[in-house]
Amino acid sequence: MMRISIGFGVVLAMLWSLAEAQVMSYGDDELKLQDKSRACFMVFAKLYDAYYFRSEDGGARCVKLDYLRAFDQDELIEATEKIFTKLHGEPVANRFADDLGRVAAAYQPVSPGTSYQYCVGGNGAGEMMRDGQVVVRLEDPDFSERMMNIWVIAEEGDGKPRWNFSRCPGTVF
């Protein structure tokens, strides 16, 4: 009987932690997990696990990245600038050079287990957080949305993201 009670307690604890991971708070909004995926380079090099959260009305959205390998600051900056420019073109990247510089200055090296989160609030402003601490605020709604496009290019009709990175095949987590 004791073994059954302990086993039931472990199952409840696991279910509780799973339920906790499905919702996050951002400002005054409660965001629900819409999708998760694993980013890979060249199919086999695992980069990070990505989670997409959004409020019920879609006004507030967050991408949480849990890194699976180390990157130095220069690698993070180079990847951000390269993807931003590829998506939006060099004239737009030049127009937002100051904002991109603020993002670059906020980056710190990552190791496996480091978490970055990027959110766009209902007012259109963006915030980047590292391990839960805000490292940069971005007031321009146009730039904030374009930054979100680095990871999520659009939303499908059901609120699920259309990821803007190569996904690892067959990954379930």
Image (tube, rainbow, N blue to C red):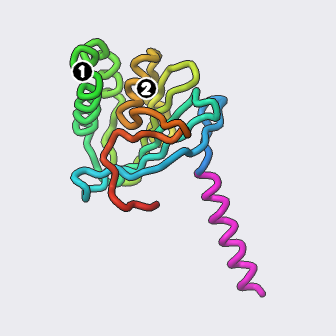
Question: Who's the residue at 47% across and 24% down the image?
Answer: 126
- Look at mark 2 in the image and give the residue it sits on: 136
What type is the residue that disc 1 sits on?
Gly
Question: Who's the residue at 23% across and 39% down the image?
Answer: 75
Reply above or below: 137 against 17. above
Looking at this view, is 138 or 42 the one in front?
42
Question: Who's the residue at 49% across and 37% down the image?
Answer: 156
What type is the residue that disc 2 sits on?
Val
Q: Quadrant of residue 121?
A: top right
Residue 18 is covered by the magenta coloring: yes
Query: Residue 12 appears at what percent x and percent y?
Result: 70, 67
Looking at this view, is 26 or 92 the one in front?
92
Looking at this view, is 136 or 121 the one in front?
121
Reply above or below: 147 against 164. above
**Relative to 145, 17 lies left or right:** right
Reply above or below: 127 against 20. above
Callout 1: helix, strand or loop? loop
How would you rate the neighbour count of disc 1 (Cα within 10 Å): few for under 14, some for 14-19, many for 20 or more? Answer: few
* Residue farthest along the front direction in this orientation: 157
How would you rate the neighbour count of disc 2 (Cα within 10 Å): few for under 14, some for 14-19, many for 20 or more? Answer: some
Q: Quadrant of residue 8?
A: bottom right
* Tag shown at residue 89: 1
* Residue farthest along the bottom direction in this orientation: 1
Q: Which residues are magenta?
A: 1-21
Query: Quarter of the image containing the N terminus?
Result: bottom right
Query: Residue 6 appears at what percent x and percent y?
Result: 71, 78
**Relative to 123, 89 lies left or right:** left
